[in-house]
Image (cartoon, rainbow, N blue to C red):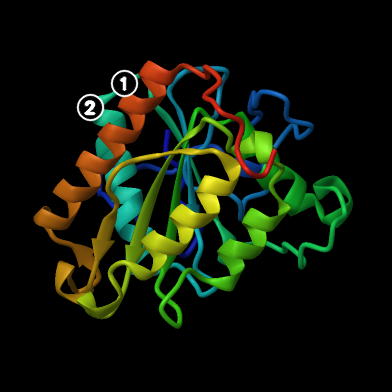
Amino acid sequence: MAVVPKGRASASAAVTTATPVAKCPIAVRRSIAATFPMALVDIINVPDSPTALVIVLGSATPPGRLHRALATAAERATGRHPALTVTTIDLATLEIPYADGRPPAEASADTARVVDAIAAADAVVLASPTYRGSLTGALKNLIDHLPVPALRAKPVAVVAIGASDHHFLGVDRHLRDILTFFGAATTPTSAYLTSRDFTDGAPSDEALARLDALLDTTLLFAEHLGGEPLGPPPIGR
């Protein structure tokens, strides 16, 4: 069941408001958190399941086109895959301090919960606007908090958005370098969106088709890898 925070437009008229997230218990594997705060997620419930997907929105600004596109894509994916559950983590709503070597639990409550959710997921989507030809500092800072096992051998997909095609490989290339350090099972291709993929803030059918294909590929990876270790050990072991 999708939860639409107060004041945020729903990605679909079919989405209805449910019990406030702050009151919704969740069952996250290896998680120390009993609940997520209202600001943390849009779509809740990450059970011990081979179809648990976490989407991380790396923008440091209020929700916009990237958020709307991925919220719509996630809703479509749950329609195609009934057992799928999706948690969307919006970094613009969280307090995650600079990574300074402290364990996540000592950094902040938000940091611990986000790291927990990523570690518990069976697949992850990392999404970022293009800032100065690369991913956002907010997303890189979160990744710096992650222990290597949180992403090792885990299917990870990359989604980026930019004003034009000029930087279409910026986020993709730099995230792939980082994910290699973790030994993540990164999907062969990514999804890149530009201004022409939106009309009045809504993603086009063609843009959603690309996101559909990427999410389906990510879930296919999760199904076939099944948490099996991949070798040799990653650089960051």
**What residue type is disc 2 on?**
Arg
Of residue 50 and residue 233, the one placed in the foreground of this image is 233
SS state under label 2: helix
On residue 80, the disc is 2
Locate residue 96 relative to residue 196 in the image: left or right: right
Residue extending farthest left: 206
**Is residue 23 visible to the viewer in this orientation of the structure?**
no
Residue 222, above or below 211: above
Can you give x and y, in whole percent of width and height, for residue 140 in the image? 60, 63
- Please name the residue shown 21% across and 64% down the image: 202
Q: Position of residue 80 (x, y in %)?
A: 23, 27
Where does the image place residue 187, in percent across and percent down from the top left? Answer: 34, 40
Q: Quadrant of residue 159?
A: bottom left
The image position of residue 53, as x and y in percent, is 46, 34
Q: Residue at image x 59%, y 43%?
A: 182
Q: Could you tell whether 124 is left or right of 147 in the image?
A: left
Is residue 51 among what the camera can see?
Answer: yes
Q: Which mark is residue 122?
A: none
Whether 210 is drawn above or below 64: the answer is above
Q: CA distance from mark 1 to mark 2?
A: 6 Å
Q: Across the whole image, how many numbered discs are drawn on residues?
A: 2
Q: In the figure, is residue 113 to the left or right of 65?
A: right
Looking at the image, residue 45 lies above or below residue 125: above
Q: Which amino acid does the dot numbered 1 rest on?
A: Pro
Quick one: 9 or 64, which is closer to the camera? 64
* Residue located at (29% from left, 57% from top): 69
Q: In the rendered view of the protein, which quadrant contains the N terminus?
A: top left
Picture residue at 68% right of the left edge, 48% below the top: 37
Pointer 1: what residue? 82
